[in-house]
Image (tube, rainbow, N blue to C red):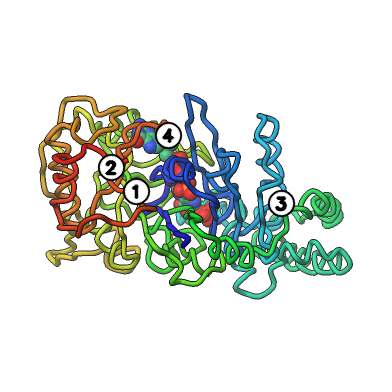
Amino acid sequence: MSRSVVLFGTQWGDEGKGKVVDLLSEQADAVVRFQGGHNAGHTVVVGGRSTILHLLPSGILHPKVHCFLGSGVVLSPPALLEEIAYLEKGGLPVRDRLHVSSACPLVLPCHQALDQALESMRKSKKQVIGTTQRGIGPAYEDKVARRALRLCDLMETGGWEEQLRELLDYYNFLLEHWCKQDLMDVNAVLDASLAWVEPLRPLVSDVPARLATLRGAPNTKLLFEGAQGMLLDMDHGTYPYVTSSNTAAAVAATGAGVPPRSIDYVLGISKAYCTRVGAGPFPTELKDALGERLSDRGMEFGSTTGRARRCGWLDAASLRRVHQINGLDGLCLTKLDVLDGIDPLQLCIGYEVDGVRYRALPDGASLQARCRPIYEELPGWQKSTSGLVLASELPHQAVAYLRRVEELVEVPVTMISTGKDRRDTIILEDPYADRQAAFVPGEHIEQAVAMHGTFS
Ligand code: GDP
Ligand code: IMO
Ligand code: MG
């Protein structure tokens, strides 16, 4: 029997997904990206060496793991080729175990030009979204509008020039008349695109068929790696301050091309506090010295754009909503070490707007912007948790904090990350192993501390 785990972000991205994917990849046969594009930035630290990945799955650092980009991913050919070259220059072979769906819509220079032009127009109206300006939004718009050019189109060079010219005509119309910007040089884009064909050709693959074969083989382990986070989801996030894909765990099935019932375990990743990069509502944001302290200690700067991330308290009310939508089997809390020495701690348990209480963020950007968090106060701890690998070594206040998160979200905390490195992790449940005992909200973490310290 094969086993499939979906790992995804439960906040506004940058929860530490890359680190955890890398860790779980030690035992995986295949790691699959299923949505997003090179707007993602996943930092993986192994033995003090840091690697930032944007498009390649974070399992790529394990030389035996096969990596897949499913058709739900929007693919920038130059970004992919650059990332492969960066890893291969560092001595890590990539090409022989990378499989890219021929149905991936392409992110082309015209998408990036429009993304940038629209952001600068929004700037003058003070309505900036703060996109990564990689062209992700326009690329997904083209997909939904059925005019996207896909990897399979690029591979069929016979019709490519005509298709590309038509698309660029459309973009040049928008850039000239709507955005009042310079036009794209069609011939330059065409020449650049033709240079992608041969390097990409060997990577093109029938991803659903390969994944079906892997799932059919005995004892294979598949890991589906989400990018961005649930609060950036098109439908369930803080719309319109979201990314242009669905980031929910369910998308692993459609975005990779596997049956929904093939997913065995859903692992949500959350920081022990909260960050957001870009504009949009953030009820628990701390715009004071404490926010700065989280930012400094957590080194909260975007891996893709280098922008400072906004910081705030953990929002258990949003996590509860994320659980309603995704059915989490386990929750991994990262960056617990960043909370060391902060006392007291606040946990958001709901919101209030004009005297009305909400258990989840209400829909609507202006209502969300007016949400005041309702906090529950918990004691902090003074001892360092940095690099701990045993739950039994956690300060009792940290255990109480994790226990309260379990109770409020009604999901067991199954992993705790205590540092950047692959090794700095307390594993309370292996998502690839069968669950040993029924989960009782709030008791799981304490049982783990008392019985084992770790289940790894
Ligand atoms: P992703 O986009 O979800 O993969 O997250 P990012 O890689 O963009 O951001 C997470 C950052 O936190 C990276 O710089 C990681 O190296 C770092 N990180 C991950 N887990 C921990 C942890 O437990 N403690 C600390 N201090 N840093 C961590
Ligand atoms: P990872 O995978 C954090 C944010 C942008 C912006 C919004 C829309 O590293 O967690 P887009 O370029 O997608 O149209 O931007 O989404 N955003 C992210 N924030 N982490 C990410 O990825 C993000 N990808 C997009 O900052 O607010
Ligand atoms: Mg990131």
Q: In this rendering, would 141 be left or right of 435?
A: right
Please tell me whether mark 1 or mark 3 is closer to you in this view.
Answer: 1
Residue depicted at 53% across the width and 52% down the height? 31
Check disc 1 and give the amino acid type: Asp
| Mark 4 vs mark 1, CA separation in Å | 15 Å
Q: In this rendering, would 422 be left or right of 138?
A: left
Of 72 and 267, the residue lying toward us? 267
The disc label shown at residue 60, or none: none
| Mark 3 vs mark 4, CA separation in Å | 29 Å
**At numbered mark 2, what does the secondary structure look like: helix, strand or loop?**
loop
Label 2 neighbourhood size at 10 Å, few (<14), some (14-19), many (20+)? Answer: some
Label 4 neighbourhood size at 10 Å, few (<14), some (14-19), many (20+)? Answer: many
Question: Which quadrant would residue 164 be assigned to in this image?
Answer: bottom right
Q: Do the residues labelled 3 and 4 touch (CB within 8 Å)?
A: no
The residue beneath circle 3 is 77
The residue beneath circle 1 is 430
| Mark 3 vs mark 2, CA separation in Å | 41 Å
| Rendered location of residue 86, percent (x, y) | 67, 35
Q: Are marks 1 and 2 in contact (CB under 8 Å)?
A: yes
Quick one: label 4 or label 2, which is nearer the N terminus?
4
Question: Which quadrant would residue 319 be assigned to in this image?
Answer: bottom left
Q: In this rendering, would 182 be left or right of 343?
A: right
Please tell me whether mark 4 or mark 1 is closer to you in this view.
Answer: 1
Please tell me whether mark 3 or mark 4 is closer to you in this view.
Answer: 4
Q: In this view, does 311 lie above or below 69?
A: above
Q: Are marks 3 and 2 in contact (CB under 8 Å)?
A: no
The residue beneath circle 2 is 455
Check disc 4 and give the amino acid type: Arg
Residue depicted at 31% across the width and 33% down the height? 418
Check disc 3 and give the amino acid type: Pro
